[in-house]
Amino acid sequence: MVKQISNPNEARDMALFLTASGLWFICVGIQSVFLPWVLLSVLHASPFEFGVAQMCLMLPVLILVIYGGYLADRYPLRGLLARIYLSSSVIALLFAAWTYQATLTYPMLVAYSLLFGVLSAFCAPAREAFLNVLGQRQLQKFVTLNIGIEFGIQVAGFVVGGLVTWLGISLMFMALATLLLLSSIAAARISTTTPSKQHSGLLAQTREALGFSVRHPVILPVLLLNGLIGVFFLGSFFVAMPLHLSQLQGYDASLLATANIVFMVGLIGSVATLVWMGGINNKQRTLITACLLGCVFLAVMPYVFNRAWMLALLFGWGYLGGIALSMGQTLIQENAPASNKAQVLALLMLFFMGGNPIGSFLLGTLLEYWEATSVGVISAMTMTVAIVVISYKHKLWDMHYDNINSAT
């Protein structure tokens, strides 16, 4: 069982944790503009190639995140996070040198996406487990703030990514390397850590975490809803939305950056609302409602070709997304057992982030042959039906529960 070491500098440690996490997500924001722009404007990738490249960024999460959770439950979290951030900095530095010497190719970009995806698979469960250790006294507040920083700080990354036309590809990789190095330094300075645990069988521990999650009346339906968000919402955000924006008049990297910024501003607005309200008691109903309303936006957006209306829809979609993510993560954090919390959180990442490559590949393939409007309506209808079925079958709407959260 993981025990938190007594720490008189709790506020300082949380600030360092959020700084390290924020720097990582600035890089995620840069890549959200930088990599799609390279694919569409430099490499002239087809919709299928675009979907495959975006899939590769999250595919390792689908494969390795459970193992990442296993390691996070057994190794000191501070050192593990610092090493992950440092490794990602080294990879970005290598690609900066590579692209300085030679032209970036499609296979090279796919290779970078896969490598960063591998590190993301190890980073996500360790980061969420460490958040539970550092912020357990006010868990919903810190989960909400962390989501706001994770996604809101990406606005800075979108701005930097939008400068790729002027800075060039090699300098973009250098900027990523610098920010990730600073992230590693911030994580290494946290005074709180967790002790190493005796290694046990990966399969046995995974079966235990999976069995607990499947039997739990709250965790299972929340995992399923997050899987739907990953497939249809993340898939649409990373594939359908950039492709749709490329059809608008005057499209360039700055428009893609603006769209990402507006989406994140909506998400930040939802976080500010939740913090101002002091939290929400019925998280399940709020999660379901946000997901259903998000389906409406998913169906409508492909029909909109006016830039102002499109940005307004993205703001609303981001607002709903922030609410859904906050409710889902808080429910998992509150109900996951302390003994293998990171592996249960890894299951959340598996369903949420792992749904992205599935959605990216699926939507990229459908958009290769069908109109975007048809794909949007089909996606929205499929997700709506699935949400209703999951909520009804697991009685999630009217459920009352006592959370078991304990990081000690």
Image (cartoon, rainbow, N blue to C red):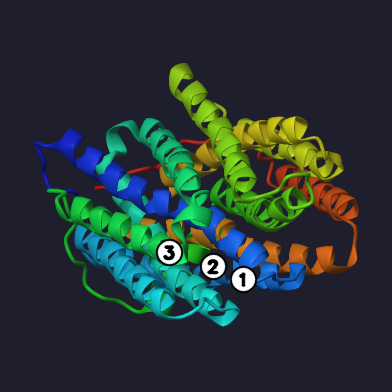
Pick the front one: 176 or 15: 176
At 72% from the left and 38% from the top, the residue drawn is 294
Q: Residues within 10 Å of mark 2 (few under 14, many from 20)?
A: many
Pick the front one: 89 or 199: 89
State how many labels appear.
Answer: 3
* Marks 3/2: CA–CA distance: 9 Å
User: Which picture quadrant has residue 153?
Assistant: top left
Residue 230 vs 155, above or below: the answer is: below
* Marks 1/3: CA–CA distance: 16 Å
Kind of element beneath mark 2: helix
Which label belongs to residue 196?
none
Which label belongs to residue 120?
3
Which label belongs to residue 57?
2
Q: Residues within 10 Å of mark 1 (few under 14, many from 20)?
A: many
Q: Residue 319's spot in the image, x, y percent?
A: 61, 32
Q: Residue 241, can we see it? A: yes
Q: Residue 248's spot in the image, x, y percent?
A: 78, 46
* Residue type at tag 2: Leu
In which quadrant will I find the N terminus? Answer: bottom left
Q: Residue 208's spot in the image, x, y percent?
A: 44, 67
Residue under label 1, please give it.
Answer: 53
Residue furthest out toward the front? 166
* Residue type at tag 3: Ser
Indicate left or right for 387 with 194 as reference.
right
Kind of element beneath mark 3: helix
Query: Disc 1, disc 2: CB below 8 Å?
Result: yes
* Marks 1/2: CA–CA distance: 7 Å
